[in-house]
Amino acid sequence: TQVAGTVVRTLPDPVRRALAELAREQGVSMFMVLRTALAVLLRAVTGGRDIAIGTPVAGRTQPELDDLVGMFVNTLVLRSDVDPDLAFTALLRADRDTE
């Protein structure tokens, strides 16, 4: 239907701190923790194991492009195999090791 919307939520500070601690313990970024959590949610909703999430990435990494005008953004598809038998930390490590 191409109908979409935006949902904005602010994480309570204790939750944010716990997620940041998990990220630190696992040697990953907060982005990776949230992406893996989203993959687990999508697996629960869809029933599929092969979860693909698109994310924008900066495309202006070369200094010679600094003076150019325009959008230098690409979309990167990040795939996760969300095995329902694995613990969240195991899924997080698997995502970390494949990026």
Image (cartoon, grey):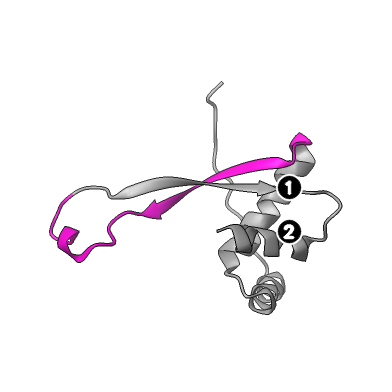
Q: Residue at x 66, y 42 (%)?
A: 51
Quadrant including the C terminus: bottom right
Which percent across, then down, holds residue 73?
Answer: 34, 49
- Which residue is more in the foreground, 25 or 19? 25
Indicate the amino acid at tag 2.
Answer: Leu
Q: Is residue 47 magenta?
A: yes
Residue at 70% from the left image edge and 56% from the top image edge: 37
Numbered circle sitting on residue 41? 1
Residue extent of the magenta highlight: 46-69
- Looking at the image, the residue that sits furthest to the front is 98
Q: Is 97 located above or below residue 46 in the figure?
A: below
Q: Earlier in the sequence, mark 1 or mark 2?
A: 1
Position of 89 compared to 79: left or right?
right
Residue 23: which numbered mark, if any?
A: none
Q: Position of residue 47 (x, y in %)?
A: 79, 36
Which corner quadrant of the image does residue 1 belong to? top right
Q: Amino acid at mark 1?
A: Leu
Q: Is 92 part of what is drawn in magenta?
A: no
Residue, far left:
67
Image location of residue 62, percent across then percent down? 24, 62
Left or right: residue 20 compared with residue 41: left
Judged by depth in the image, the label closer to the viewer, 1 or 2, is 2
Marks 1,2: beta carbons within 8 A: no
**Residue, x 68% and y 68% (percent of image)?**
12
Label 2 secondary element = helix
Gap in Å between the C-alphas at discs 1 and 2? 13 Å
**Residue 91 bears which disc, if any?**
2
